[in-house]
Image (cartoon, rainbow, N blue to C red):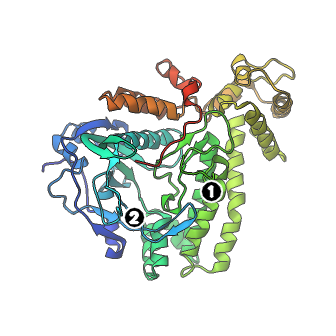
Amino acid sequence: MLHTLPLHIQAFSELPEAFYSRVRTEPLGEPYWVAQNHVLAEEMGLRPSEIFDNADNLLYLAGSAKQYDPAPIASVYSGHQFGVYVRQLGDGRAVLIGDSVGSDGLRWEWQLKGAGKTPYSRFADGRAVLRSSIREYLCSEAMHGLGIPTTRALAITGSNDAVYREEAETAAVVTRIAPSFIRFGHFEYMYHTGQHHNLPVLADFLIDRHFPECREAENPYLAFFQTVSRRTAELVAAWQSVGFCHGVLNTDNMSALGLTIDYGPFGFLDAYDRRHVCNHSDTGGRYAYNEQPYVVHWNLSRFASCLLPLVSQDDLVAELERFPDIFQTAYLQKMRAKLGLQTQEKGDDELVADMFTALQSRKVDFTLFFRYLSEVGNVHGEPLPEKLSALFHGPTEAFTAWIGRYRGRLRAENSRPAERAERMNAVNPLYVLRNYLLEQAIQLAKSGDFREIERLHRGMQNPFVERKEFADFAELPPQWAEGICVSCSS
């Protein structure tokens, strides 16, 4: 097979074999391209034509290589799923096929998701369906466009092979890209199976490649945990600021690098609902929008317990106790920017909370509210912009009171409306990857039309800049889209 992919042996294979198994992929039958991410290829220092114009590369990324050299890797990990510990999970349908190194020296892991069974598939078939593959491909790139740390997606390969979930669907493979796919769950597996000697091995692997500054600390492992905790707090603050709901925040879906990872039944808020649940399996609302900071904190505590052989309990507890303040600081910083505020004042948290109370009362669209708020002037009693007023179906008493406080704050800052609007529009997206937009693209793709995938991809690359060709992405969701709840099946 004469593929032209610039892949090197997986760095992950430098770890002991207790961390992984070598596997054989199960090729897609008669694969074809569904999506090609030329932008990411160029960011990785690759020429898109060399990647996507080679028929052997198509086969390679569809799991069809007769002989991968070296063989792909599936890693083993544990996890707390909905709060319950599960001893062995692992890459049940994802395999590392190699690493590439860009001209900037950055190393990228390449992972095929949906390329067949692994030793960790349990009762699953190791496949991914076209529907879920499109969702992962587009959302990982949409999150990157929003400036939120995330795994990436280079391509989707499809096939007419049948896969059975709630109904018959077709198979696909996503080529996922990340600096590392290591999760909290990798540490959990080694800790809970008594392989404590492998904990410093894994921590050293991450520190040497991704956290070299931690080597300067008195205890590099404590510094490592502090860095992971801070990155995780900042990540969930970023999610909350754009109305992103992950849907399945199990510990095995938590990246050790602070990346958004594993796009399953996710969703962006349409009408603001602090208790919004996007995963129909989450009947108790454990992973609801407003619960995300708390469950992520809990997940960090599970991760911390695995570092007890390396870090004192007192130090770990002290760092966990800092998490709420780190999150709140990052979150309020995001919210001030969204509101166009340039100073930090006592009571900012109340200003934000009261704003969301007003949004909740009228089920106001989260994304468009912040975008249209940029058009509000500083003058007391001035009529609201028409678009903003329409979101509330006419101003409410609560919002009228809030807007008065907000305008007072703007005047106190001597805020210039035009400059403030420019700042706000640079951080408040006009376009987010709403589930109904995804559903429309998926239905077209099922009939062989992949153009909407490409159009969504282009629109979400820079969601802050208004463009006429993407005007429909900025519309309120249709009535049929209200309350979309997504399945975990993929």
Measured from the top left, where is residue 327 in percent x and y? 67, 55
Measured from the top left, where is residue 268 in percent x and y? 57, 39
Q: Which residue matches tag 2?
A: 90
Q: Amino acid at mark 2?
A: Gly
Per the rendering, the mark at residue 138 is none
Is 183 located above or below residue 265 in the figure? below
Category of crowding for the residue at label 1, using alpha-carbon neighbours closer than 10 angstroms: few (below 14), some (14–19), many (at least 20):
many
Q: Amino acid at mark 1?
A: Ala
Is 154 located above or below residue 480 in the figure? below
Residue at the image point whose x is 14% and y is 55% from the top? 66
Q: Which residue matches tag 1?
A: 233
Which residue is at the front of the view, 115 or 241? 115
Q: Is residue 470 left or right of residue 83?
A: left
Q: Is residue 448 left or right of residue 66?
A: right
Viewer-nearest of discs 2 and 1: 2
Is 80 located above or below residue 426 in the figure? below
